[in-house]
Image (tube, helix red, strand yellow):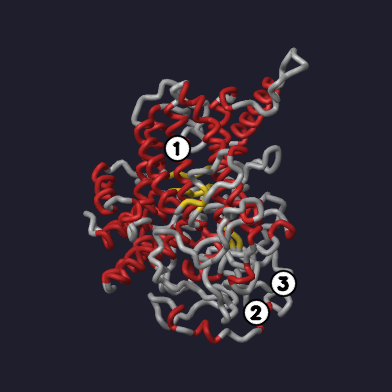
Amino acid sequence: MKNKFLKLFVAIGIFSLASCETTELDLLVDPNSPSPDQLDPNFVFNSIQLSLPGYVNAVNGFTRQVTRQTAMTGGTTYNNAYQEVSFNGIWGSGYGILNDIKGMEPKATELGLNYHLGASKVIKAYVWSSLADVFGDIPYSEALLGNANLSPKFDNSADVYKGALTELDEAITLLSQPALIYPKQDLYYGVGGGVNSSTQAKWLTVAKTLKLKLLNNARLNGTALGVNIATEMSTLLAENDLIDTVDEDFSFKYGTSRALPNSRHPNYNTFYENATTIGGSYIGNYFMWTVVGEKAVADPRRPFYFFRQDTNTVGETIFTLGCAYQSRPSHYNSATFASFYQPAVLAPFCVATTSGYWGRDHGDGSGLPPDNAKRSVPGVYPVGGKYDEGVQESVQTNGTAGFLGAGVMPILMSSWVDFIKAEAVLTLGVSGDARALLESGIRKSINTVANFKTGLPAPTVAAVDNYVNYVLTAYDASTDARKLEIVIKEYYVAAWGNGLECYNNYRRTGYPSNMQPTLNPSTTDYFYTALYPSDSTVNNPNSPANSRTKRVFWDPGNLVLN
């Protein structure tokens, strides 16, 4: 992977130098700003592929916190945890990718590059739909016009979704045709094996799977899209060309290079360098508790998901773990936030468990103690970190621990697809066995995580079966509503590393319903959508007033989330 990144940057550098060669001194065209018809689609396609995981990571920064995968530490309530400027990264990264795709399309169309175009349309659909998921109404029909329109109007999020679905239909058409010319590189499906008809077929599978996901997101308001969601989803399910194996997973694989370029997983860069980089980053106590404390059975993914730098939180001082010397908030004792597998097990406070699972509670905005070498950090999956064998040691070692950051950015995984199908069976009545799909999704997730790296202790068959059977027993004893919640809860666990999936699921279903509340009992309205960034509110007079209570078109609007 390191070599591929270096080759890419060298290629881009050569291309830049070549574009500057001229014998004319009175050029009318700036050689450093070539027009779209002068760009090589191969280079632009590479840039688009490389930009996508950065965009997903930017979205993660917000969505993982409000869904408790990581801790919200920027404030004690939603009212003060985020500001408009907090969302500039998502906005700029997303529209940057869309602008690059727009610049590539004319030349790629002229040359008949249906592989480049089809894969880019998949990425375009993902970015458009996820921007709408995060912000609601956004500039769409008048966006990306440059100086021709510096103040684009904001379109309804349903119209953005319609556009994304159209892009996917066009991608399906393009990718169903043989490619006359293949891209030089495919950083998702061609790493180590070249680019060919097989990699193109996987992009076709991604296009159909993303369409299924967007339809499921919108299942409560298909009218806004002008489609029958159940019928559309049933058609895709009947075709059976959906992501269902690990080799079809839509994810970006990182390398191990620390510099020139830094090709490692961004969360490895954060947690495995030193005290300066780790800063206020914590895993959410609720998420760790969900994996290690909520059920009466061990989750086989635990030692792959988390690494404990300190395996015991008992006896810490007020300077390292101040919350241990504070009273448990009374609202944390509510049955609403207790385990629904074991009602007597209450929501976590201060730490996920005393056996070293040390994160932060939701909305703990207190100062940073000297705990950078004590708090739990992401493990082997997905960041390429360290496997937890119960050995206490710091990973603040300048990026030399574990698998050196050779992690993955999960974007659309085979296990998630099973949970999406199960939800559709339970809520839309489409054909399928929700219980079997739930089991399949769990097993695929465990298999993906446990086999992510070689040379690590594999969970035993008995350990996997014990976990699966525990969840299925609870599922069998549940009401229809609780069955759906168990599906969504297992989706939540499997989606470690991607906050957008959890954010969409939470707003659509209200599950998990026992999300840990903010530490401050004087909570404020949940972020049903993100704030419009200052880059928009300051520069675009058409930018609507910010309100956390505005909703995406597919949000049922009757859920009060915490």
- Residue 435 can be seen in this image: no
- Image coordinates for residue 455, horizontal then vertical, percent: 51, 48
Quadrant in the picture for the N terminus = top right
Q: Nearer the viewer, residue 37 or 360?
A: 37
Residue beneath disc 2: 323
| Tag 2: amino acid | Cys
Q: How many marks?
A: 3
- Image coordinates for residue 112, horizontal then vertical, percent: 43, 23
Element on which disc 3 rests: loop
Residue beneath disc 3: 367
Indicate left or right for 186 with 54 as reference: left
Question: Which of the two labelled residues, at mark 1 and mark 3, occupies the earlier sequence position?
Answer: 1
- Which quadrant would residue 295 be assigned to in this image? bottom left
| Tag 3: amino acid | Gly
Residue beneath disc 1: 121
Q: Nearer the viewer, residue 240 or 358?
A: 240
Task: Give the foreground label among 1 and 3.
Answer: 1
Element on which disc 1 rests: helix
- Image coordinates for residue 341, horizontal then vertical, percent: 38, 75
Mark 2 touches mark 1? (CB < 8 Å): no
| Tag 1: amino acid | Lys
- Image coordinates for residue 253, horizontal then vertical, percent: 53, 42
Real-space Cα separation, disc 1 to disc 3, in angstroms: 44 Å
Q: Nearer the viewer, residue 481 or 254?
A: 481
User: Residue at (45%, 37%) from the top-left corner?
Assistant: 121
Task: Give the foreground label among 3 and 2.
Answer: 3
Real-space Cα separation, disc 3 to disc 2, in angstroms: 11 Å
- Which quadrant would residue 420 be assigned to in this image? bottom left
The disc placed on residue 31 is none
